[in-house]
Amino acid sequence: MSERASRHISVLGREAVAYLEPRAGGIYVDATFGAGGYSRMILDVTDTRVIGIDRDRNAITGGFDLVDGAGGRLTLVEDRFSELAEVCAAQGVDAVDGVVMDVGVSSMQLDQAERGFSFRLSGPLDMRMAQSGPTAADVVATATEKQLADIIYIFGEERHSRGVARAIVAARKEAPITTTEALANIVAKVVRAKPNEIHPATRTFQALRIFVNEELDELHQALAAAERVLKPGGRLAVVSFHSLEDRIVKNFLSERGKVSAGSRHLPEVAQSAPSFQILTKRPVVPSDAEIAANPRARSAKLRAAERTAAPAHADDDLPSWPRLSDLKRGG
Ligand SMILES: C[S@@+](CC[C@H](N)C(=O)[O-])C[C@H]1O[C@@H](n2cnc3c(N)ncnc32)[C@H](O)[C@@H]1O
């Protein structure tokens, strides 16, 4: 299958797909189809089958040519990757040989001003990957000052979160904050730009994006879903782009790589044997050459593991971070 020019340059794609060890007859889930870079590499191996998932309709429609050229070996599904087990079941697949995830946003999403992900481009304050549900502007308009401060602190790791939240609440009393530019200007008055440091709005934008798309819950649930659908010997490879995501992957794999203590909610659930064998003691990071060619690769980390024959562990409690449902309850 030939490479097709695409605007998103895959990060750590070769390495992630190498960990899957795709083989003829194998079924693989590309949980973050994007521009299809990873799927293409799996399909390059003869007689593989790929189920590609993306919650962004533009990514799915952008992949139709690849579907046409794949001779029935690629199926694309518009859905959240937390639903990957259900997506596979709907395709008549109850066990797979590999799951790969390349979490975060694509260059297509970041670079389209109208999607509202970037503080560098003026556009509506949207940030929804799935193009449905509450926008970042809705969150900025309706969250309490405390909720905004928590979101910005927890998901943006922004030290000035309280100041930013206060400034947002003061500004929205004057006029609705509906554009990326308006929000970036409000943040820049509180978080001062320092030479050679990231743009002052970086952390606040990251926080809102994670919150609007429920990214950490999605990742947590997708890892557990992968554990349920992978065959013994099946491989999981995950590329993440910031420390919050990498911590979730690392903690999940280290918990699943040990004997579990059982569930405190279900005392009858006994200890379980490790469900994964970790293949990457340390995360794989991009080479200097990859970072030079694609600066967006610089924070990427790849972790991989092989499914054992042990049953999936009991679901762990999700951390109590801010959630969209809290906003809807106004709490
Ligand atoms: C970094 S891009 C993937 C790029 C892809 N590996 C490639 O080589 O073209 C991430 C993609 O995952 C999608 N995505 C992120 N979170 C998702 C989720 N929870 N469910 C489904 N798709 C998601 C985004 O819409 C985006 O298209």
Image (cartoon, rainbow, N blue to C red):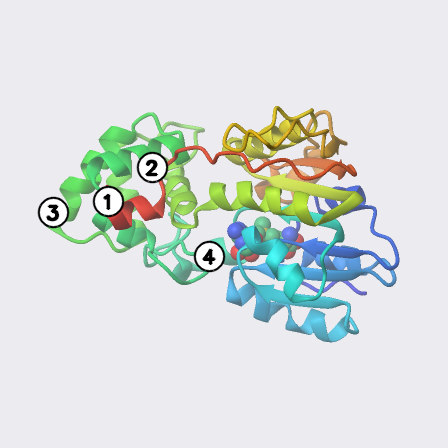
Structural crowding at the residue carrying mark 2, measured as other residues with C-alpha within 10 Å and reported as few (<14), some (14–19) or many (≥20): many
Q: Mark 3 highlights which residue?
A: 173
Which of 229 and 306 lies nearest the eye of the viewer? 229
Residue displayed at 88% across by 58% down: 24
Structural crowding at the residue carrying mark 4, measured as other residues with C-alpha within 10 Å and reported as few (<14), some (14–19) or many (≥20): many
Horizontal and vertical percent position of residue 220? 54, 40
Q: Mark 1 highlights which residue?
A: 143
Q: Are marks 3 and 4 in contact (CB under 8 Å)?
A: no
Q: Given this view, does label 3 or label 4 mark the residue nearer the observer?
A: 4
Residue displayed at 65% across by 72% down: 64
**Above or below 22: residue 61:** below
Numbered mark located on residue 160 in the image = none
Structural crowding at the residue carrying mark 1, measured as other residues with C-alpha within 10 Å and reported as few (<14), some (14–19) or many (≥20): many
Q: Mark 2 highlights which residue?
A: 151
Q: Are marks 2 and 1 in contact (CB under 8 Å)?
A: yes
Horizontal and vertical percent position of residue 233? 82, 42
Picture quarter containing residue 223?
top right
Residue displayed at 39% across by 44% down: 211
Q: Residue 270 vs residue 247: left or right?
A: right
Mark 1 or mark 4, earlier in chain: 4
Amino acid type at image mark 3 = Lys
Amino acid type at image mark 1 = Ala
Residue displayed at 69% across by 24% down: 259
Between marks 1 and 3, how big is the CA–CA gap?
13 Å
> At numbered mark 4, what does the secondary structure look like: helix, strand or loop?
loop
Q: Mark 4 highlights which residue?
A: 129
